[in-house]
Amino acid sequence: MVCKDLLMIGNRGGSNVGESFERAARSLHLDYVFLNANDAMSGPPIYRKVFWHLLGRRPVALRRFSKAVLDTCREVSPRVLLTTGMAPIDASTLSAIGKIGIKRCSFLTDDPWSESARSSWFLRALKQYDFVFNPRQLARADLESHTKARVIDLPFGLDPELFHAPRTYGGTANYASDVFFAGGADHDRVPYIAALRSGGLSVGVYGSYWERFAETRDIARGRLTVEELPHAIAAAKVGLCLVRRANRDEHCMRTFELPAVGCCMLVEDTDDHRKLFGPEGRTVLYFSEISEMVSKAQWLVQNDAERKRLAEAAHAVITAGRHTYRDRLETILNEIAARP
């Protein structure tokens, strides 16, 4: 029988964490198989809408994809199954995989109890994992009461193949802005962007749905590809790092991506950010209120030397601190090895 180190379930394309873990596995010379979770979403558009909106965000091909995962486990006998996000594997399949003796591990990119992600089929499946690697402290108690898995804190990370120093980029003029922000237009985010604009700052705002709001419609710049994203970061004077409170986040992927590209950061004040970047003014500036964010953004835009100092300090923290997805994957495998 062929025996693999790892079977990974995740999405490819863009800055998906699954593909970053795949690159990490390759760099560690692991023998792995990767199954694309997007395959579980295949089906006629009307079916996808019905299953998503009326059947609790259930993927159309959940059963078929789950069977493919189980068949692959039986064929290649991996030591570890690692899934990312709301992996489309049902509870009965995960139970069967456990009986084979494979360690079942989830890296939760989303809060499974958030309004935008909650689904009964996934919460049932979550109970079957042996390890849950959790980027959000505020969800830890729920995870520990919901599942018998070992819940291990593990933050998001950096994919250096996608995000690296700004000197490697050219042609950033089209993306120039005082303040950069990329992310979906959640209702609670709109006042932040609107306030920056009212404060006389040019805002490069990228992502979905900003055109739906009168306050941001005419400054919405659309979505960026992962290749374009570092150019836009590098072209901004300040990078805004907002977490998603609805997702119980205290840090996010931009926490690592902005400083890796070399951007001066204005960061929402959270425990995770303080632990990573240290006190105010060492590597970043923090804000808790909208008015504080605007005044600090205005000050940074006017102070070139301080922006440069902060950008270099934050870049050093991230790039020298074992924050890549290769580091995260090593941590996952070490935790599994230490707890047979």
Image: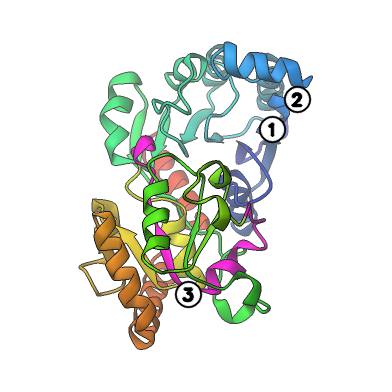
Q: Which residue is mark 3?
A: 262
Examine the structure image and report whether residue 240 is included in the region drawn in magenta: yes
Kindly identify the residue that appears in the image at 66 percent across and 13 percent down.
50
Element type where label 1 sits in the image: helix
The residue under label 2 is which amino acid type?
Ser
Which residue matches tag 1?
Answer: 38
- What is the x, y in percent for residue 235? 55, 74
Q: Position of residue 159 (x, y in %)?
A: 55, 59
Q: Residues within 10 Å of mark 1 (few under 14, many from 20)?
A: some
| Label 2: few (<14), some (14–19) or many (≥20) C-alpha neighbours in 10 Å | some
Query: Gap in Å between the C-alphas at discs 1 and 2?
Result: 7 Å
Here the colouring is rainbow
Q: Which residue is mark 2?
A: 42
In 3D space, how far apart are the residues under numbered discs 3 and 2 (Cα atoms)? 38 Å
Whether residue 106 is visible to the viewer of this picture, yes or no, is: yes
Q: In which quadrant will I find the N terminus?
A: top right
* For the residues bearing labels 1 and 2, Cβ distance under 8 angstroms: yes
Q: Is residue 63 magenta?
A: no
Please state which of residues 78 and 323 is positioned toward the viewer in this rendering: 323
Amino acid type shown at disc 1: Asn
Q: Is residue 95 left or right of residue 9?
A: left
> Which badge, 3 or 2, is on the more N-terminal residue?
2
Q: Is residue 202 above or below residue 185?
A: below
Residue 118, quarter of picture: top left
> What is the C-alpha distance between the residues marked 1 and 3?
32 Å
